Image (tube, grey):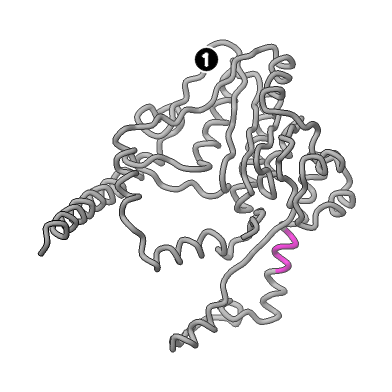
Amino acid sequence: MKKKQMIGLVIAVVLFIITGVAGVLTNVLSEKILTKDVETMLTGDFTFDPPYDAYIAVVDVMGTIQEQTETSWFEEPEGYQHVTTLDYIDSLMDDPANQAILLYVDSPGGTVYESEELYLKLLEYKEETGRPIWGYMAHYAASGGYLVSMACDKIYANTNTTTGSIGVIMSGYDMTGLYEKLGIRYVSITSGENKDSTKLTEDQIAIYQSQVDEFYNKFVKIVSEGRNMSENQVKALADGRTYTAQQALDKGLIDEIALYEDMASDMCDEMGTDVFYELQSPSDMLSQIFGQVKKLVPKSEAQILKETAAEMESGVPMYYAKPLQ
């Protein structure tokens, strides 16, 4: 065996061992991490330590709105963290120094469940505290990202924001043609004709369509209440299309177009404080090392296909704006 091959083999074995150890520790520690609330996350993913003086809390909604992924001490949380965000808002309710929330949205949306749960938590914050919520839309605030913004008393958007996409999608793959080409025979033994949706019949499509329609009507009602528009006015805009910031402003879907700095300045003037607080996600050296090691291990084609299918075509109802491919 050549020297280069031997070195490569040794490196591969070391990476495999490190990854295995990280996986075991993740399974052991993840349950403890997820059961901690915001105040006790001093050695975990987040730290809640706001100033004593009056402040405006920044709540980030960045990335796909979905169920919180499990992380350990050896991993850095990525994207939107649902449970942590809800706990964060609960903590803000109990803090008299908090004066308002700045909801920073940079999201194409996500699942119906988590999107509505966040929206309701924001409404609870306003009802319990009487404090306002202002929203700022960055690159995207579409579908579920737009829905959560309906809890805001005032909505600003960047001039290049993509928003709207008021609608619902439920999708999946029909793999029967591929199975036939590969000589794979799919067998399903069910308790009822609608239990298996692998080969959708017209009746099954109608069943799922009724569910999508129900979620859609709920979305329309939320927008109607949030923007003080009639449901018919909302439905005229809610065919799933996205809007530019200017189009959204013209149609009453947002209030102003501005840079983030200008919006923050307006909010400071209104709230009487220029102190902003954002929940911290400390970058731990150990988590960075293990994160880099994980990236070095190549994924198999099966892993890539599975992850892509899970991300884009889950079969779960989504308030999601699917980007152009």
Q: Position of residue 263 (x, y in %)?
A: 71, 24
Residue 31 in the image: above or below residue 216: above
Specify whether residue 226 is painted magenta.
Answer: no
Residue 188 in the image: above or below residue 31: below
Quadrant location of residue 212?
A: bottom right
Specify whether residue 212 is painted magenta.
Answer: yes
Residue found 34% across the figure and 32% down from its top: 284
Residue 196 in the image: above or below residue 280: below
Q: Position of residue 198 (x, y in %)?
A: 56, 78
At label 1, counting other C-alpha atoms closer than 10 Å, the crowd grade (few under 14, some 14-19, many 20 or more) is few
Q: Is residue 11 visible?
A: yes
In the rendered image, which residue does mark 1 sit on?
Answer: 51
Residue found 64% across the figure and 26% down from its top: 101
Q: Quadrant for the C terminus, please.
A: bottom right
Amino acid type of the residue that numbered disc 1 sits on in the rendered structure: Pro
Q: Is residue 130 visible?
A: no
Residue found 58% across the figure and 47% down from its top: 65
Of residues 23 and 249, which is closer to you in this image?
249
Q: Quadrant for the N terminus, please.
A: bottom left
Q: Is residue 155 left or right of residue 186?
A: right
Residue range of the region highlighted in magenta in the rendering: 209-214
**Prevailing secondary structure class for the magenta stretch in the rendered image:** helix
Q: Position of residue 13 (x, y in %)?
A: 18, 56
Residue 167 in the image: above or below residue 25: below
Q: Is residue 218 left or right of residue 307?
A: right
Q: Is residue 306 left or right of residue 198?
A: left
Q: Position of residue 233 (x, y in %)?
A: 89, 49
Quadrant location of residue 215?
A: bottom right
Name the element at disc 1: loop
